[in-house]
Amino acid sequence: MNNLKLKPTLAKRLSTSSLDHQRNIRFGEASSELLSDFLSTLSNQNKSNLENVSSGCGSFKGSRVVEHAFLICEEFRLDPSVAYHAVEILERFMLKHIENISSQQKSEVCDGSVCAARGTYEELVFQSLRDKFRLFVISSVQIASKVTLHTNVIDNSSALRYLQLVGTDCPKQKILDSELLILKTLDFKVNIPNPLSYAETLLEVLGHNDPTTPVEHLHHLCRYVLQFVYLQRESIYSSLLMAVTGCLSPSPDQRAKFVPVTEDCMLLGVGVIAVAAFIYQTSAWEKVVEELTLITGISAKSIVDFTHVTVMHITKNKGK
């Protein structure tokens, strides 16, 4: 049996075509060769993303946005993976779109008589976005539904009915324009691996390396754990920041240096699996952590810290 443990420093540079292939395969169906390709591709993708992290990352992954994406997927009976994918698309689009229109409107304002009014262009930017945000969310879910196989697709008529249902009425043409704006702003690069892809791929590799791993049980739990982490993202990462720094009030510099941690999908993937393993069988979870460290190169301490913080939040919420 081939060993799928990936040494990050030796990871192969693969094209995104393997990500396309991955979307054609359900959990548990990939061969060992494909799993190796998937894992290498995700590792390289994650490294690339972390090299381009900005201070605004995470701004559009708040609990209300994530919950809205999940509710849309529930309404249309879409796989939860669509919601994660949609949130990733929305985040990347909004950061780029705000950057574009800020530059444009700042130039226009400074050319006019209100140039001296500090903050005017920021107000114009957010004013123009406020009424469109709900439309951007449904458009992101639309796009995610179209690039994710094994799921339904939200067409413009369905999107229009949903918007009317939640009290937002707009012409069907605006829905089409919104979708096109997102695609063009992202240069049509919307085949983005989402956190669930990382967790499922790592879990399959874990099962391949150690056949005694209860993969099916952990997969079931991982979906719930990942959803919880995404909905409690801000509070969990705030607690993790305090845990790793030992400070109840981390400095701005510490917070800035911590941003890449919040965007590390590989860490999130191993953390979610470790939490699921802790919940399923506490006596065996250290073995899972050890194996995940060998697969990804992420330190056992980082995985344990993530696990302890997340379990603490799960326990706290359960007690409410």
Image (spheres, rainbow, N blue to C red):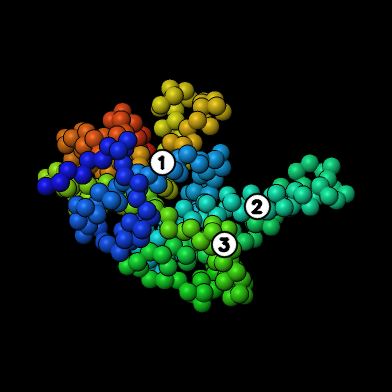
The quarter of the picture where the C terminus appears is top left
| Dot 3 or dot 1, earlier in sequence | 1
Q: Could you tell me residue 11's position as x and y percent?
A: 31, 41
Q: Residues within 10 Å of mark 3 (few under 14, many from 20)?
A: few
What residue sits 24% from the left and 54% below the top? 34
Q: Could you tell me residue 249's position as x and y percent?
A: 51, 25
Query: Is mark 2 in CB contact (under 8 Å) with mark 3?
Result: no
In front of the other: 71 or 219: 219
Residue denoted by label 3:
184
Name above or below for residue 303 compared with residue 108: above
Label 2, label 3: how far apart the Cα atoms are: 12 Å
Label 2, label 1: how far apart the Cα atoms are: 25 Å
Q: Is residue 269 left or right of residue 214?
A: right
Name above or below for residue 80 compared with residue 56: below
| One can see residue 182 in this view | no
In front of the other: 162 or 201: 201
Q: Is residue 106 left or right of residue 154?
A: right
Residue denoted by label 2:
100
Amino acid on which the number 1 mark rests in the picture: Lys
Query: Is mark 2 in CB contact (under 8 Å) with mark 1?
Result: no
Amino acid on which the number 3 mark rests in the picture: Lys
What residue sits 25% from the left and 49% below the top? 36
Dot 2 falls on a residue whose secondary structure is: helix
In front of the other: 234 or 299: 299
In front of the other: 310 or 207: 207
Q: Could you tell me residue 160's position as x and y percent?
A: 54, 73
What residue sits 69% from the left and 57% below the top? 128
Quarter of the figure with residue 310: top left
Label 3, label 1: how far apart the Cα atoms are: 24 Å
Amino acid on which the number 2 mark rests in the picture: Asn
